[in-house]
Amino acid sequence: MKANKMLTKREETDLIRFARDLVGTKSISGHEEAAIRLVEEQMHRLAYDEVAVDSMGNVLGRIGSGKQKVLLDAHVDTVDVPDAGDWEYAPFGGELAEGRIHGRGAVDMKSGAAAAVFAAAAARRMGLDKGKSVYVSCTVMEEDCDGMNLKHLFHEKNLLPHWVVICEPSNNRIALGHKGKAQVIIRTHGVSAHSAAPEKGVNAVYAMVPIIRRAEQLQDGLTRQAGPKASVSLSRISSTAASLNAVPAECEIYLDRRLAPGETRDAIQAEMERLIRGGNASWEFDSLRRRSWTGMEVGYEPFHEAWRIDPDHPLCRSCRSAYVDVFGAEPDGYVFWDFSTNAVTPVMMGIPTIGFGPGDPRLAHMRDENCPVEQIIDACRFYTCLIGRL
């Protein structure tokens, strides 16, 4: 396969136009309908064999009807933009400048979504879909509830892929896995009293101080680990009092704990017990409730262990072959993502899963997010080649 012949000039032009349209369509988590409808229309325009939107609001397209089922997944929701006035280019403009698409979602991860949508159609045109059913899912609510979208989609559509490719940004390098995640709430419990007589109460904020110091010490230790590093970050603190003239009876902190490979739920539970030892405190794994754009209530517990695919797995070997097809050389290394992705669902189900996508992941959620056009086109070529190699 010659990668430079993989896409026609018309396909490249249409791909970039579609990526710009997606970036220019605001789709904050829970409000993705316009982006989903845009994907749905594009799939129909590319003559997908089947296009459907499930009850959660995810869109799933299929090309081919073979026994081997390949899924390319990309979420189309984004985080919000609280600083729109400080961007060089309008965050929802989808502007093309200096060879890059600028705007919220350009990296995370509408460019990958566009590349996947066009890759399935290119694979069919080249006859690379023979014996396969190629699915492309553009999913919702990943930013808050990663994996719940695919869990619902697989169940509702009775879909069990043989292979899954997560199109998150990796600078077009093969991603072998990512860290796990545990989001934890810790509360200290005090006794309320009037602020004029604080000695009669127990200030829950002061009781939280040693726990915060232990969390800081924990992070210091985690940074000294070899290999992919675990981490803990205190991302929120609040207190509850009868008024501003009362001693707080409760204090709460929120910990974002990222898990290295091999760290388990039991290990994190023991770690949290050590953090709160000796104090009047309690902890729990967080649980979230969100509503999708279709009105569906979604419950989510943000706990996932890390995962990694073996570099010698057949899926990884196929990725290396596709990489050579596109870039003319073996990959010079692999990526292990710091962040969590929709991969948590297929990995939990035992489905071989790997990652690859355009854009620098360090720009995700950042001001002036942007993605090189060349990477989007190369990602589409890679996905097309990979479909043929599987």
Image: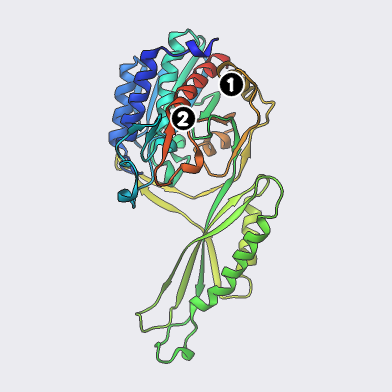
Residue 292 visible in rendering: no
Tell whether 177 sits left or right of 369.
Answer: right
Q: Which residue is mark 2?
A: 73
SS label for mark 1: helix
Tell whether 320 sits left or right of 91.
Answer: right
Q: Nearer the viewer, mark 2 or mark 1?
A: 1
Q: Which residue is mark 1?
A: 323
Mark 1 residue type: Tyr
SS label for mark 2: strand
| Residue at figure coordinates x 57%, y 30% from the top left | 173
* Structural crowding at the residue carrying mark 2, measured as other residues with C-alpha within 10 Å and reported as few (<14), some (14–19) or many (≥20): many
| Residue at figure coordinates x 34%, y 16% from the top left | 46
x and y percent of residue 142 in the render?
Answer: 43, 41
State the separation of the CA atoms marked 2 and 1: 19 Å
Residue 358 visible in rendering: yes
> Mark 2 touching mark 1, by CB under 8 A?
no
* Structural crowding at the residue carrying mark 1, measured as other residues with C-alpha within 10 Å and reported as few (<14), some (14–19) or many (≥20): many
Q: Is residue 10 above or below residue 346?
A: above
Query: Nearest the camera: 218 or 301?
Result: 218
Question: For the N terminus, which image quadrant?
Answer: top right
Give the colouring mode of the picture: rainbow
Mark 2 residue type: Asp
| Residue at figure coordinates x 39%, y 43% from the top left | 368
Query: Nearest the camera: 248 or 96?
Result: 96
Q: Is residue 302 above or below residue 277?
A: above
x and y percent of residue 363 in the render?
Answer: 46, 42
- How many callouts does the rendering have? 2
Tell whether 356 sits left or right of 41.
Answer: right
Question: For the C terminus, which image quadrant?
Answer: top right
Q: Quadrant of residue 174?
A: top right
Tell whether 141 sits left or right of 322.
Answer: left
x and y percent of residue 131 in the render?
Answer: 52, 10
